[in-house]
Amino acid sequence: MSDHNQDALEGWTFTSGEVSVGVYRFSGRHYDGRSVERQGPDYEAIKADCMNDARTLEKPAYANRT
């Protein structure tokens, strides 16, 4: 697995790798303990979803209410 933060989300560290043949995991951890993770066969899709999850967690709590 590799560490990276291509989209420069401050405070986040991301790792990714192939956990089984054709199955990928992309996960992120914020320095304050928040974390996100996605797993599936489409690496680019799970990466995008995981990054979006991290961005959602960056919003103030009141902004996440519907």
Image: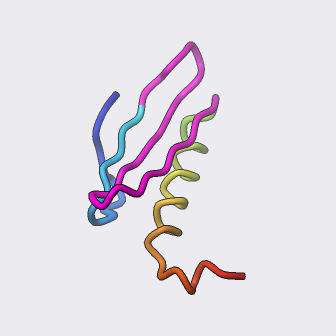
Return the x and y of residue 53 as percentages of the image width and height: 54, 59
| Quadrant of the drawing holding the N terminus | top left
Whether residue 49 sits left or right of residue 8 in the image: it is: right
User: Which residues fall within the magenta stretch?
Assistant: 17-41
Q: Is residue 54 above or below residue 46?
A: below
| Residue farthest to the right, as pictured | 66
Query: In x, y percent, where is residue 21?
Result: 57, 13
Taking the spot 36% from the left edge, 38% from the top edge, the residue there is 15
| Outermost top residue | 21
Q: Is residue 62 magenta?
A: no
- Horizontal side, residue 46 vs residue 65: left or right: left
Q: Main secondary structure of the magenta part?
A: strand
- For the rendered model, the colour scheme is rainbow
| x and y percentages locating residue 25 in the rendered image | 50, 33
Nearer to me, 16 or 30: 30
Q: Residue at x 41, y 34 (%)?
A: 16
Residue that lies at the very extreme toward the bottom in this rendered image: 62
- In the rendered structure, the answer to whether residue 32 lies left or right of residue 21 reads left
Q: How many marks?
A: 0
Which of the 4 image quarters holds residue 20? top right
The spot of residue 31 in percent (x, y) is 27, 57
39 over 59 or under it: above or below: above
